Amino acid sequence: MLVNCEYRLYVLNQTTPLRNNPFLSHWVEVIQRLGTPSTQNDAKADGSIISDEVNTVRVELIKALLQSRNPSQFARVSPRQLHNNYVEMWQTSLFNIRTYVRMLEEEGIYDSTPEPESDSPKSTASEPAKHGAGKLNEFQRWKLGMLSRLETEPENAVPELTHLPIELSSLDFLTTLLQEKTLQSLNIEPAPVIADYIQHALRLMEQMGRPGETGAAEAEVLLESGREAQTRAVKLLLLFMRNLIRKALLPLESIYFEIQEICVRYVWIREVREFRAFVEEGPGEERDEG
């Protein structure tokens, strides 16, 4: 189940540049957490697979997917064959996780880690992993606090929710709220919340394209500006909106005007033109396959 899920997550977004893949932080976290098996790695007497072996297969498959240019090679490989390759035959691959941590840092998912000084005896190879874990823990605490505030003081929590930055972690959190119907369970109508967030994101992206005119309020949430940053933000928002449509998490008409705005304002971006074609052709068939 685990290896099939990891494979499907990769295939679902294989046309997305890896640094913009919404699951990259998940894979980095899995490798950091499970990459070092525990010392209790003795096989069971009956030959059954133990948890450390499951973790090894999962981690090695993720490494192979991240480094592969042809993930279809894994399409017909069974989990048992993967176990034979990665556990019984020890076919592990060299893997530099720092490369992928750096992608997350450059995209603003992790805070940038200062390069260690060459004469500092305290700098170790494990620093990026520790730093990434700290970032995730911090965001996890924020999420728990937000869920609590949505329940106890929604009048204050909802505006905060609709003014989140354009980051994968924020978009993933909003998507999870919709998938798990958290807002509905708290008697909060989700469509206006998401439409307001998209409008906020569109205003931020407009300011990114005009850095000299950025006001004080926008400056507090803009991490960077310029055409490149604006393009990256547009692509992230498109990923979010495409998921909403493909998974039928919101009625299409509830964000119709936001879709029209992004398709007109940023038509010069190739991914926007592809998104417009996706909407016009109808996502029903793709959604059924998912």
Image (spheres, rainbow, N blue to C red):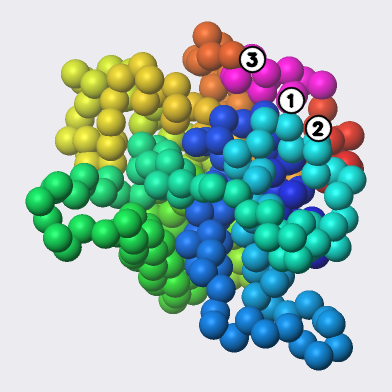
Q: Position of residue 91 (x, y in %)?
A: 68, 54
Where does label 2 land, which residue?
Answer: 283
Q: Is residue 21 above or below residue 57?
A: above
Crowd tier of the residue under label 1, counting other residues whose Cα lies within 10 Å: few below 14, some 14–19, many 20 or above: some
- Secondary structure under the numbered disc 1 in the rendered image: helix
Is 113 on the left or on the right of 3, as rendered?
left
The residue most toward the top is 268
Circles 2 and 1: CB atoms closer than 8 Å: yes
- In the image, is residue 273 part of the stretch drawn in magenta? yes
Residue 279: mark in rendering = 1
Q: Position of residue 257 (x, y in %)?
A: 60, 27
Q: Is residue 102 above or below residue 124?
A: above
Q: Is residue 12 above or below residue 38?
A: above
Q: Nearer the viewer, residue 8 or 181?
A: 8
- Secondary structure under the numbered disc 2 in the rendered image: loop
Is 214 on the left or on the right of 80, as rendered?
left
The residue most toward the front is 89
Q: Amino acid at mark 3?
A: Arg
Where does label 3 land, which residue?
Answer: 273
Residue pictured at 36% horizontal, 17% vertical = 227
Q: Image quadrant for the C terminus?
A: top right
Q: Amino acid at mark 2?
A: Pro
Q: Is residue 69 above or below residue 277?
A: below
Q: Magenta stretch: give its range.
A: 271-281
Q: Main secondary structure of the magenta part?
A: helix
Crowd tier of the residue under label 2, counting other residues whose Cα lies within 10 Å: few below 14, some 14–19, many 20 or above: some
Circles 1 and 3: CB atoms closer than 8 Å: no
